Amino acid sequence: MKKLITSVLLIPLLLLGGCATSQMGDPSATLAGAYIGGSLGSAVGGIIGDNGHDWRGGYRGSAIGTIVGTIAGAAIGNAMTAPKDESSVNAYYPPSNGNREVYSDNILRLHKIRFIDDSRNQAIDPGENSKVIFEVMNEGDRTAYNCVAFVETVGKVKYIGISPSVTIDEIAPGDGIKYTATVHAGDKLREGRITLRVGIRDENGIICDAQEFTLPTHGNY
């Protein structure tokens, strides 16, 4: 009996350990799911086992139900709270050769630029929050200090707000960072198109790499 109880208690821990190398959900939700699933499995298994008119059958049914329910409950709890990979959900990848400024004597380069909007229609809608995500890699042989990653609109644009630029203390040779900027559209956004510019500046304020891309905007007017 002690061995059975010990095995049941260990199952949620083993399940949590197995998720460490992949996308893992909220641990509390996983444990809660394991507890609920185990309790329900125990009750159902006990009822099934009791049909054999033997207390041992009820006990075995309850134990087996607890094990199965714990595994299923933990898996469901983990899956429901696991973070989604934003980089692959209907993202728009601008052409890498379109409206791009690259300076060969600088060491910082942009990679994997992508635009993700809440509605996943690859456009900006009124009141919608969107994200521009890109990576900055140091492809040189010296450390880059005080770099500034930015996303901005090209020209005068109304009813569009973009999160502030970020200063990166340092990027070692061969290393990189991933930067995410939030783009918010006001409720009075008009029908048309918008051009966004993403880029990276070095410590002297010189643009090392920048790229523009254009997206449609939807409006209520």
Image (cartoon, rainbow, N blue to C red):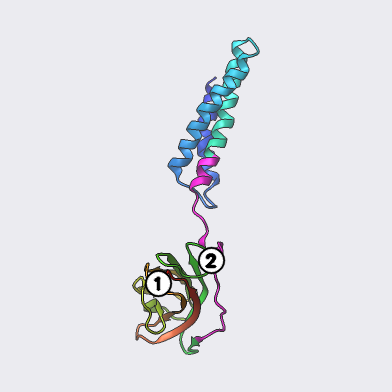
Quadrant containing the C terminus in the rendered view? bottom left
Is disc 1 in contact with disc 2, using a CB cutoff of under 8 Å? no
- Extreme front residue here? 221
- Extreme right residue here? 52
Q: Is residue 143 above or below residue 85?
A: below
Q: CA distance from mark 1 to mark 2?
A: 16 Å
Residue 139 in view of the camera: no
Residue 2 in view of the camera: yes
Question: Number of callouts in the render?
Answer: 2
Q: Secondary structure at mark 1?
A: loop
Q: Residue visible at 62% across and 17% down?
A: 49
Check disc 2 and give the amino acid type.
Asn
Q: Is residue 44 above or below residue 176?
A: above
- Tell me the tag on residue 121: 2
Mark 1 residue crowding within 10 angstroms, few (<14) / some (14–19) / many (20+): many
Quadrant containing the N terminus in the rendered view? top right
Tell me where the magenta segment starts and ends, as one range: 75-100
Please tell me whether residue 96 belongs to the stretch shown in magenta.
yes
Check disc 1 and give the amino acid type.
Leu
Give whichever of 113, 136 is nearer the camera. 113
Residue 146 picture location, percent across and down: 35, 78
Instruction: Give the quarter of the image for residue 60.
Output: top right
Residue picked out by circle 1: 189
Please tell me whether residue 162 belongs to the stretch shown in magenta.
no
